[in-house]
Amino acid sequence: MDFTIFFIPPLLGAFIGYFTNFVAVKLLFHPKEPKKVLFLEVQGLIPSRANEIAKAIVEGLEEFVTEEDFKELIRSALRRSLRNKIGYLSFLENYGILDRIADYLSKVVDAGVEYLSETIARNVELREVVKRKVEEFSSEEAERFIKQVAGKELKFIEVSGAALGFLIGCLQSILLLLLL
């Protein structure tokens, strides 16, 4: 009996599994523009659903980024800037004046942050800014970004196709062995 026929199904299964998952990952991003293939119109998943993806990102950000987060971001930036600016007054620390100045400026910063964040919130629609920025992403930028973030996972999908194909090929070889 020629045992090479038992090695072919696992190897062929690994090749087919890897190749199909490789193509599936490529189809996430390509083709960037709709193309006719036989009687179907084909476009990559990411390019074809860019607007829906942008909307989902915006809704996710709105859910997790609150006005208080925004205020705290401004507050910490202003305090950091003030600390750098009043650092040269450190000689006043011995007289207790520096702490009073810092307390006073902290109150001024808090009041300013409140006013600033309310003004910004009224005049700048975060949803629209983020949505516009995401929609301005080119397909190439989106692909590069996604591959940068999820490159290992995409590679895992390809390799797992090979592993599953190999296992299925092994099962086929076992069945073939039992039937012969």
Image (spheres, rainbow, N blue to C red):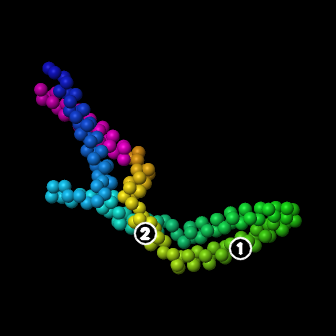
**Kind of residue sitting beneath label 2:** Arg
Q: Is residue 83 left or right of residue 90?
A: left
Q: In this view, does 10 lie to the left or right of 157?
A: left
Q: Distance between the residues labelled 2 and 1?
A: 36 Å
Q: Which of 134 and 76 is in front in this view?
A: 134
Dividing the image into 4 quarters, which one contains the C terminus?
top left
Q: Which of marks 2 and 1 is in front?
A: 2
Dividing the image into 4 quarters, which one contains the N terminus?
top left
Crowd class of label 1 (few under 14; some 14 to 19; many from 20; radius 10 Å): few
Circle 1 is placed at which residue position?
107
Residue 79 image position (x, y, % from top left):
68, 66
SS assignment at label 2: helix
Q: Which residue is drawn at 31% across and 57% down?
A: 32
- The answer to if 130 sits in the magenta stretch is no
Q: Which of 132 and 5 is in front in this view?
A: 132
Circle 2 is placed at which residue position?
132
